[in-house]
Image: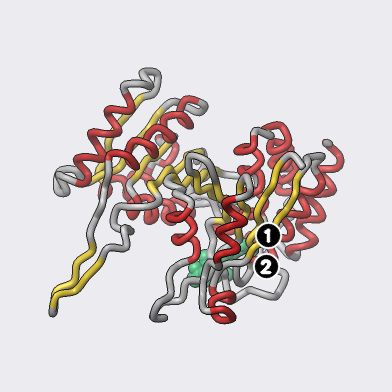
């Protein structure tokens, strides 16, 4: 087999949307071997661990992973998010979220086509927290190493797009942590003279992103800022059910829908599989199969143009029937 792909269906609607993405992948003439692995809350309830050892082993012996959402319920002692655990173990330092309008889907704004590149392993999500009496602390860790790697990734993406990187800090207040991030972005930018670089503070950015999203191409952020801005940006384009993401490291990558496990609609065959299918498309791009990846998006756009939608987009197609339509269109262009 040419590519070995780990598949984690995850929890809730992950078990419905990931199989649909796999159906789409199987339509393409690509030599894929799929290795199923488990992680998440359901595994935790069964086995007391969110990411079992054998799953880590599978990740280490595959080229990339397609994963569904995994539930992270608050207030359970000893419980750690499976996604965060995998990101840390596999050192997937860049989280990539493309956000753009699709035909026929009404979002808050038109002309949105941006990518949020977020540092994925440190910042305020360092996991280093403690309490002393009535005082609680979280350590914000910013390193030159991770800032450099994530910046480099952002500039590389920008080169293939509209050649603009907007990076987000609060460097006037957090002079050390945001300061180091800022210095590192400028250091990397020297290697990419064709890419325009600008800094916007997080408070201003959360306004501007809604007011004039078409201004932005690649938006580069430390961890927490990127997490917040990407949820904010999702409302620009219609439904969280259409947004894919990638977690990228030096030697491995995991692709996931942005949405969560949606327990309110799980098991009803009404979830929108678009985010999972577009995550599979990103996985193919990562593997170098750009032409095949483009076909997936083309088939999807045709479906949207025919006003075929799932319930979250005011349509009445079920998860599997919606995917049938994508496959039908894919077969026409293969
Ligand atoms: P989690 O705790 O896993 O994050 P959640 O329900 O808090 O789950 P999401 O799963 O992101 O968060 O869901 C937010 C809302 O969007 C829910 O009402 C859910 O039904 C809806 N939603 C999320 N993903 C989809 C999808 N793929 N198709 C349709 N609706 C979705």
* Relative side of 235 to 268, left or right: left
Q: Closest to the observer: 235 or 151?
A: 151
Within 10 Å of disc 2 (Cα), the crowding (few <14, some 14-19, many 20+) is some
Cα separation between marks 1 and 2: 6 Å
The structure residue drawn at horizontal position 63% and vertical position 48%, both measured from the top left corner, is 62
Where residue 46 sits, quadrant-wise, is bottom right
Residue 295 percent across, percent down from the top left: 74, 37
Q: How many marks?
A: 2
The structure residue drawn at horizontal position 24% and vertical position 55%, both measured from the top left corner, is 140
The residue pinned by badge 2 equals 15
Question: Residue 7 bears which disc, if any?
Answer: none
Q: Quadrant of ligand 1?
A: bottom right
Where residue 200 sits, quadrant-wise, is top left
Q: Secondary structure at mark 1?
A: helix
Q: Is mark 1 within 8 Å of ligand 1?
A: no
The residue pinned by badge 1 equals 18
Q: Closest to the observer: 101 or 78?
A: 78
Q: Secondary structure at mark 2?
A: helix
Where residue 76 sits, quadrant-wise, is bottom left
* Relative side of 285 to 172, left or right: right
Residue 223 percent across, percent down from the top left: 35, 51
Residue 56 percent across, percent down from the top left: 55, 59
Label pair 1/2, CB-CB below 8 angstroms: yes
Picture quarter with the C terminus: top right
**Figure check: 286 above or below 124:** above
- Whether residue 218 is visible here, answered yes or no, is yes
Residue 241 percent across, percent down from the top left: 59, 58
The structure residue drawn at horizontal position 53% and vertical position 65%, both measured from the top left corner, is 260
Picture quarter with the N terminus: top right
* Relative side of 24 to 227, left or right: right
Q: Give the colour scheme of this rendering.
A: secondary structure
- Whether residue 106 is visible here, answered yes or no, is no
């Amino acid at each position: 087999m040419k590519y070995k792909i780990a598949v984690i269906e995850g929890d809730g609607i992950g078990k419905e949307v990931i199989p649909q993405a796999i159906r789409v992948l199987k339509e393409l003439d690509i030599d894929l071997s799929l290795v199923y692995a488990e992680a998440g809350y359901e595994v935790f309830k069964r086995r007391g661990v969110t990411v079992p050892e054998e799953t880590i082993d599978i990740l280490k012996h595959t080229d990339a992973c397609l994963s569904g959402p995994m539930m992270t319920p608050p207030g359970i002692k000893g419980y750690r998010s499976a996604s965060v655990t995998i990101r840390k173990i596999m050192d997937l330092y860049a989280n990539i979220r493309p956000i753009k309008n699709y035909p026929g889907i009404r979002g808050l704004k038109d002309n949105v086509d941006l990518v949020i590149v977020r540092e994925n392993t440190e910042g305020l999500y360092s996991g280093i927290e403690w309490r002393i009496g009535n005082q609680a602390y979280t350590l914000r860790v910013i390193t030159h190493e991770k800032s450099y790697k994530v910046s480099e990734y952002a500039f590389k993406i920008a080169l293939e797009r509209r050649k603009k990187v907007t990076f987000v800090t609060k460097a006037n207040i957090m002079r050390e942590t945001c300061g180091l991030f800022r210095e590192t972005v400028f250091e990397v930018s020297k290697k990419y003279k064709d890419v325009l670089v600008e800094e916007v503070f997080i408070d201003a950015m959360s306004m501007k992103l809604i007011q004039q999203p078409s201004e932005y191409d690649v938006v580069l952020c430390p961890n927490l800022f990127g997490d917040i801005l990407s949820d904010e940006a999702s409302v620009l384009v219609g439904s969280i059910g259409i947004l894919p993401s990638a977690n990228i490291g030096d030697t491995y990558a995991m692709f996931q829908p942005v949405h969560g496990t949606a327990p309110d609609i799980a098991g009803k065959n009404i979830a929108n599989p678009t985010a999972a299918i577009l995550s599979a498309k990103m996985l193919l791009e990562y593997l170098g199969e750009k032409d095949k990846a483009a076909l997936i998006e083309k088939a999807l756009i045709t479906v949207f143009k025919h006003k075929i939608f799932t319930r979250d987009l005011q349509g009445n197609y079920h998860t599997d029937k919606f995917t049938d339509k994508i496959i039908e269109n894919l077969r026409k262009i293969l």
